[in-house]
Image (tube, coloured by chain):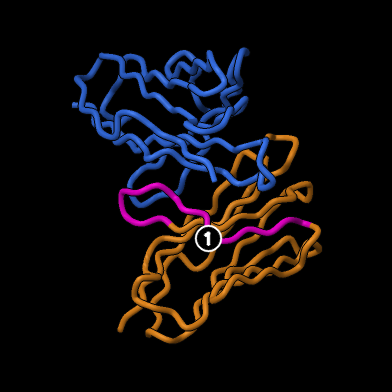
Chain colours: A orange, B blue
């Protein structure tokens, strides 16, 4: 089955700096890669996603890049703010599984003022 | 968008009893729903795929007789934890996608259920 690795497990940045979280996946058939933000005790919230036919996608301060050949994708958050502090999960899925999500282990991001 | 509602949000039960968790898609029909489990400070692990009108598909290592899934309608899937033990204490969360929406891959999550078995 699909195996998703995520690094780093914790990340601390100063407000205004950028944060980068990286993930790799094992199943070359995976074709959908969402990123979720989860605050303590709450449900995951989708922040951005990318499909395998696209190399990069940006939404304001958040961007995701995908390298299909290397089977890795990254989340980039620019101009970080304290409210960005949360746990971020990457995931990989494929259409023939109905898009069941295989999650990375998560990155705890702390943005200090 | 799409709304997925999960109930209850918290439940405490005695060891050996069963607990039923409901997952509803409120404004769309979901032929497929997914159940995940999340232990403290860990990731979400896919437990099973719930298919409307047919048997659920369980991930390796998940006991189908312990975690009973029923998807009797297009808007409701239930997960029953049978003969619960303290090690079953966890955060259980469901998700569904709105296949009829242009963003048909986006998974919408329920609020989650915090199960504590004492």
Question: In the picture, which quadrant includes the N terminus of chain A?
Answer: top right
Magenta residue span: A38-52
**Residue A44 belongs to magenta span:** yes
**Residue A27 belongs to magenta span:** no
Local SS, label 1: strand
Q: Residue at x 35, y 49 (%)?
A: A42
Q: Quadrant of residue B19?
A: top left
Q: Quadrant of residue A67?
A: bottom right
Asked if A70 appears above or below B95 in the picture, the reply is: below
Instruction: Say left or right for A71 vs B85.
Output: right
Report in which chain the residue with disc 1 lies: A
Question: In the picture, which quadrant includes the C terminus of chain A?
Answer: bottom left
Q: Residue at x 19, y 20 (%)?
A: B14
Instruction: Say left or right for A36 vs A3.
Output: left
Q: Residue at x 77, y 63 (%)?
A: A54
Provide the residue designation for mark 1: A47
Q: In x, y percent, where is residue B9?
A: 29, 34
Instruction: Say left or right for B97 vs A109.
Output: right
Question: Within 10 Å of the Cα at label 1, are there few (<14), some (14-19), or many (20+) other Cα atoms?
Answer: some
């Amino acid at each position: 089955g699909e195996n998703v690795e995520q690094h780093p497990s914790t990340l601390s940045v100063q407000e205004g700096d950028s944060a980068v979280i990286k993930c790799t996946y094992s199943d070359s058939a995976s074709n959908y890669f969402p990123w979720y933000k989860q605050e303590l005790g709450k449900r995951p919230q989708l922040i951005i996603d990318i499909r395998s036919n696209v190399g990069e996608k940006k939404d304001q301060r958040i961007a995701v890049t995908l390298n299909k050949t290397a089977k890795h994708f990254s989340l980039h958050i620019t101009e970080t703010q304290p409210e960005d502090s949360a746990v971020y999960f990457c995931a990989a899925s494929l259409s023939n599984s109905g898009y069941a999500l295989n999650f990375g282990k998560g990155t705890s991001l702390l943005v200090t003022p | 968008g799409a709304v997925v509602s999960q109930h209850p949000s918290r439940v405490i039960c005695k060891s050996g009893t069963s607990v039923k968790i409901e997952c509803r898609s409120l404004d769309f029909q979901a032929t497929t729903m997914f159940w995940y489990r999340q232990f403290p400070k860990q990731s979400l692990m896919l437990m099973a795929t719930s298919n409307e009108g047919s048997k659920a598909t369980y991930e390796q290592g998940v006991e189908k007789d312990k975690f009973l899934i029923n998807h009797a309608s297009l808007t409701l899937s239930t997960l029953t934890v049978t003969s619960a033990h303290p090690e079953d204490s966890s955060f259980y969360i469901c998700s569904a996608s709105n296949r009829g929406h242009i963003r048909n891959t986006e998974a919408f999550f329920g609020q989650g259920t915090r199960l504590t078995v004492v």
